[in-house]
Amino acid sequence: MESFMKDIRGWEDAAVGGGVEDVYGEDRATEEQLVTPWTVSVASGYTLLRNPHHNKGLAFTEKERDAHYLRGLLPPVSISQELQEKKLMHNLRQYQVPLQRYMALMDLQERNEKLFYKLLVDNVEELLPVVYTPTVGEACQKYGCIFRRPQGLYISLKEKGKILEVLKNWPQKSIQVIVVTDGERILGLGDLGCQGMGIPVGKLSLYSALGGIRPSACLPITIDVGTNNEQLLKDDFYIGLRQRRATGQEYSELLHEFMCAVKQNYGEKVLIQFEDFANHNAFELLAKYGTTHLVFNDDIQGTASVVLAGVVAALKLVGGILAEHTFLFLGAGEAGTGIAELIALEMSKQTKAPVEECRKKIWLVDSRGLIVSSRKESLQHFKKPWAHEHEHVGNLLDAVKAIKPTFLIGSSGVGKTFTKEVVEAMASFNEKPVILALSNPTSQSECTAEEAYTWTNGRVIFASGSPFDPVEHNGQVHVPGQANNAYIFPGFGLGVVMSGAIRVHDDMLLAASEALARQVTQENFDNGLIYPPFKGIRKISAEIAANVAAKAYELGLATNLPRPANLVKYAESCMYSPAYRNYR
Ligand SMILES: O=C([O-])CC(=O)C(=O)O
Ligand SMILES: [Mg+2]
């Protein structure tokens, strides 16, 4: 059979012989793509094997090998995707060093995308810590060294005035989700500049694996305005601009050009997720573009939604309603103030009390101690709502003793700050203290799971941002939960995309949170868990997506009409499947 193609720009949408409609399935090219004149690519034979979107490696069948000029290019054996998966998992487990596993998985993604996602979907609990937190943090630190191929778009100060052209260089045209970072606050690891690219890449691989957004509709972007990381500036292998960070007008002009170019190129229904920006820019960008673009800040809003879900679930274990509890945060940045505000909003909804009143149940500690009204003048604007009447308290331990919180939440990005004294103080006035050590990666966790269970004599209800292994204490095995925004953003994004929502509203975050909290089963509670296990995440994401979409329709923000009657079923039907297709 003649192997021909009509279009298709670049490698991604290249179809495989025999006509577009045979193979596209969900990756079907649009009419617009088919008439683009400047690329005609034929994915067959050798090219097909080198095309990660269509390559199946040894899984090409005899018929496919005949039809697509693959004879002789592969060894004789033809195996199933399941056997490929088994082999790869076996190989991965041979590596003892997490970064080697990461690199092997990135190579697989570059070689055979469907197999990469099949592995991720089927082995989510085992592979999440490899492609995502905590290993992705180390990968970013060493990104220059392990760099092989670009996995997303780099937009640096050099591209000023040309960002629209840069976007057009990306081979896929139908983008639904962008994750963008400027690398200034990568996890709790600080400024990693251009090497922050690992984060958008990792987040988007979860969008596809956990939330079912098509990989070809995902675009990782790093904006490089320099770095203030002296070590990287001196590093021969550093991949970014070798200059200190641009700030002020220079920074905001580049970001503005970027935001406008995205809307111009992809329309207003592309979801832009801000990730790991430093506090000042994160709040400013969200406020500035929240009313004109479809934007979502994962560190402020995604983290807030996942933690609220855990808090609501924890009430089943500790009793009482939200408004009867007292919350103390260590860390008053994006995560801390974002979570605090969403808890206050939910409290206000439940009790009908004004949100200002509800905020009084929530206290924050920053590097200078408890945030109190006498400090108000000198506080950054996002901290001001949390400056309550109280005498000066200089450190966390004294704040714990003074406030006597039922929930202690770490969101400062600084590790080992929940000391034995702090945790013991929590355990001295709470029968079941709730302690959430959210900072990432593992090295930045406020305390380890083992410390939390040991210092509270097994009474703590604990979850952390980075994963910890189960802990045995006094003959009992405790499985710590993972309070990571990875529970929320994939399903949230799916809900936004499938409803065609044009804005993100706080009520959609509450809807996501509520859907997640509902997924915690009695069995999970009996095991002290406040989050459901990740292995059911695709189902959980569908539930979250449906609840978010329902809210978007209710608020009049959804544009995909008519509204599907059964949103959970619809969400499931939209989800990307990594199973191979037959190439006729
Ligand atoms: O990436 C993660 O694991 C969670 C997150 O957004 C962060 O720590 O900044
Ligand atoms: Mg983040």
Image: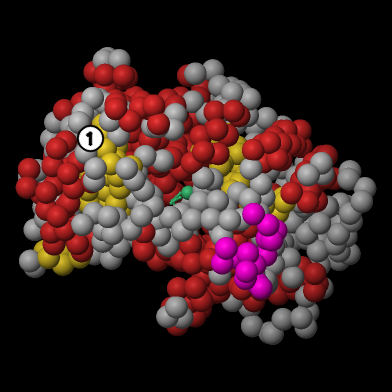
Judging from the image, the colouring scheme is secondary structure
| Image quadrant in which you'd find residue 446 | bottom left
**Which residue occupies the foreground of this view, 88 or 155?**
155
Left/right of residue 172 with respect to residue 106 in the rendered view: right
* Quarter the C terminus occupies: bottom right
Magenta region: 230-244
Left/right of residue 100 with respect to residue 13 in the rendered view: left
- Total number of numbered labels? 1
**Which residue occupies the foreground of this view, 100 or 573?**
100
Residue at 13% x, 59% y: name it: 455
Residue beneath label 1, please? 392
In this orientation, does residue 143 appear?
yes
Left/right of residue 98 with respect to residue 153 in the rendered view: left
**Image height of 462 relative to 147, above or below:** above
Q: What element does badge 1 sit on?
A: loop
**Which residue occupies the foreground of this view, 478 or 433?**
433
